[in-house]
Amino acid sequence: MTTPDTRRPRPASDILRTALRRNRGAMIWGTVLMGLYQAGETAFPIALGLIVEHTMRERSLGSLGLSIAALAVIITTVSLSWRFGMRILQKANTTEAHRWRVKVAACGLQPVARDVDLKSGEILTIATEDADQTADIIEVVPLLISSLVAVVVAAVALGLADIRLGLLVIVGTAAIMSVLSVLSRRIGSSTQEQQARVARAGAKVADLITGLRPLHGFGGNHAAFRSYRKVSTEAKLQAVTVAKVNGAYAGTALALNAVLAGAVTLTAGWLAFDGQINIGELVMAVGLAQFIMEPLRLFSEMPKYVMIARASAERMALVLTAPPVTTPGSEHPAAAGGNLEIDCVRYGTLRDLKFTVAAGEFVAIAAYQPRAAADLASVLAANVPPDAYEGAVRVAGRELGELSVEAVRAHMLVNPYDGEIFAGTLRTNIDPSGTSRTVPEAVKASMLTDVVALHRDGLDYGVRDRGANLSGGQRQRLSLARALAADSEVLVLHDPTTAVDAVTEQLIARNVAKLRRGRTTVVITSSPALLDVADRVLVLDEGVVTAEDTHRNLLAGDADYCLAVAR
C-alpha cells in the first residue's frame, strides 16, 4: 500500500527565502550597482553645493572646468549603474518567475491529484500572476537597500553641514516608515483576497467554456452567466478596494515625503539666514531636499511590494505544500501481457465488483447506471487513490497501488468519454509525442478519414482549443484515434461512440475489434455495435456483475438487457 507524502511543507516564507537564496549573486551585483546609482544621485546636489562654495571663493576657469568634469563623472556613473543594475535584476526576476511558474504548473499537471481545494483556473492564476509577484522580491530587496543608502548618504551629508538637518532626515524617515508599515499590511491582505477572487472568476470562466454547449442545450446559459457575473463583480469590487488602499498608501507616502522635504528646506533656509551654514551648504541642503523625495518614495513603497510578494507566495504555497492524494508506487508490471483483474472493489456505486479480463480479450461492460460506469472508469484510470476504495485492481499481476504512475500509463490507457482536444493539428492531437507508428491505422479505425479528407492539409489541419472548429462527433473520433494510436497493452474505452451516427458506429466497432485483436480491450458502453463485437459482455447493475455472456445470447435470454441496450 502507498503512504501519504511526508515531505516538509513549503510555507510562504520558505518560498521567498528560496527565491532570495538562489539569486544571491544577481542581487549582490544589482544592489551594488543600484547603491552606486543612488549614491551618485545623492552626490549631485552635494557636488553642486561644494562647487558653488568653491567658485564663490576662487572664481577661476580651472575650478569651473574641474567642477564640470566632476559632474560629468557623476552623471556617467548614475546612467551606467542604473542601466546595468536594472538589467541584472530584471533578468533574475524574469528567470525566477519562470521557475515558479514551471513548479506550480508541474504540481497542477501531476497525474496524481493534489489534495487542494482549487480549480484549474485558480491554479492558472497562481502559476502566472502570483509567480510574477513573488519573483518581484528579487528587485524589491536591492531597491530597498539602495534607497536606504541614498537616505543615509543624504542624512550624513546634511549632518556634516548641521547635525539638526541630519537628525531631521533620520527621524522623519523613521516616522514615515512607521506610518506606511500599517498600510502595507492592509495592502497585503487585500491583494491576497483580490487574487483569490480573480482566480475564482477565472475558474468559473473555464467551467462555462467547457460546458457552454450543454448549457445552451437545456437553456441554462442565462443562469450560468448570472453566476459568473456574481463572482466577477466580487472580484471587481475587491480590485477597487485594493486600488483605494494603494491610492491611500501612495498619497500618504507622497504627502509625508513632501512634508519631510519641505521641513529640510525650511530648516536649511533658517540656518542659512541665521548664519549657521554657508551658501554652498544651503544649495546642497535644498538640492538634497528635492532629490531625497525619490529615494524616499522608493523606500516607502518597498514594504508594499514585500507584502504583495508575501501574499502571492502564500497562494503559491497552497499548491506547492498540498500533498498528493496518494504517493504512487515504484513497481512495474510483473510480466508482459494485458490481463486485468478487478477483485471485490467497493467505491461509490460499485459493490464488491469482481471480474477478470484475460490478456488479448475484448470485453464490453454494459452498465445500467451511468454513475457506476463513471466510477469504474475513474478507478481504472488511477484517478482514485487505492486507499480510497476497498478491494484491489491488478494489472499484469501487480496491484495498481504498487505501480508507478508512469508504469500504469505505459501499460494501461483509460480513454474518457470527454477526452480533451488541444489547440494544434489533427496529427498532434492523435500523436502528441510524435512517436506512434500506428497513426494511419488509428485514423482509419476511428473513422476519422472523412475529416482528414475534408481538408487539403489532411492530418496537418489546424484544430482550435477544445476542438472548437470540430463537431461533437469529430471530436469524439479524434479522441478515439488518439487512444488507438497509443497502442497500449490494455485499453479501456468509456462510451467512445455516443456522438456518432449508427452507421459510423458499426464501422468503428468492427475496426476497433480488428485493430485491437490480440490486445486487451475493455469498452464500457451501451452501444449494441460495440457490444456485438466483444468476445463477451459483462452486465453491471447496482454496482455488481449480474450477467455474463455474448451480446446475442443476452439479447435472446435477458429481457432487462434487451430493454437497456436495444435501439
Image (cartoon, rainbow, N blue to C red):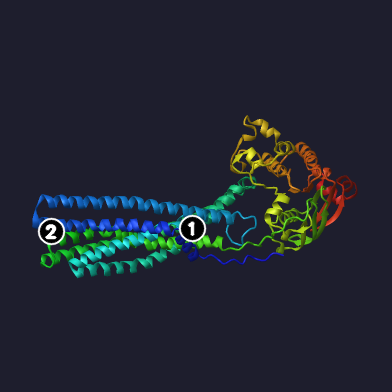
Q: Amino acid at mark 1?
A: Gln
**Quick check: can you spot residue 7?**
yes
| Percent x, y of residue 178 | 34, 69
At horizontal 70% and vertical 44% (from top left) the residue drawn is 486
**Quick check: can you spot residue 243?**
no
Q: Quadrant of the C terminus?
A: top right
| Percent x, y of residue 343 | 80, 60
Provide the residue designation for mark 1: 195
Report the disc number at residue 269. none
Q: Looking at this view, is 500 or 46 the one in front?
A: 46
Give the foreground label among 2 and 1: 2
Q: Left or right? Give the position of 32 relative to 349.
A: left
The mark total stands at 2
Compute the Cα span from label 2 to label 1: 55 Å
Q: Looking at this view, is 210 or 234 the one in front?
A: 210
| Percent x, y of residue 398 | 77, 58
Provide the residue designation for mark 2: 53
Q: Looking at this view, is 197 or 155 the one in front?
A: 155
Q: Quadrant of the N terminus?
A: bottom right
Evaluate if marks 2 and 1 touch, with contact meaning CB atoms under 8 Å apart. Answer: no
- In the structure shown, which secondary structural element does the residue marked by tag 2 occupy? helix
At horizontal 39% and vertical 52% (from top left) the residue drawn is 88
- In the structure shown, which secondary structural element does the residue marked by tag 1 occupy? helix
Q: Residues within 10 Å of mark 1 (few under 14, many from 20)?
A: many
Q: Looking at this view, is 179 or 142 the one in front?
A: 142
Q: Residues within 10 Å of mark 2 (few under 14, many from 20)?
A: some
Quadrant of res 297: bottom left
Q: Amino acid at mark 2?
A: Glu
Residue found at the far top of this picture? 456
| Percent x, y of residue 198 | 50, 55
Ranked by sequence position, the earlier of labels 2 and 1 is 2
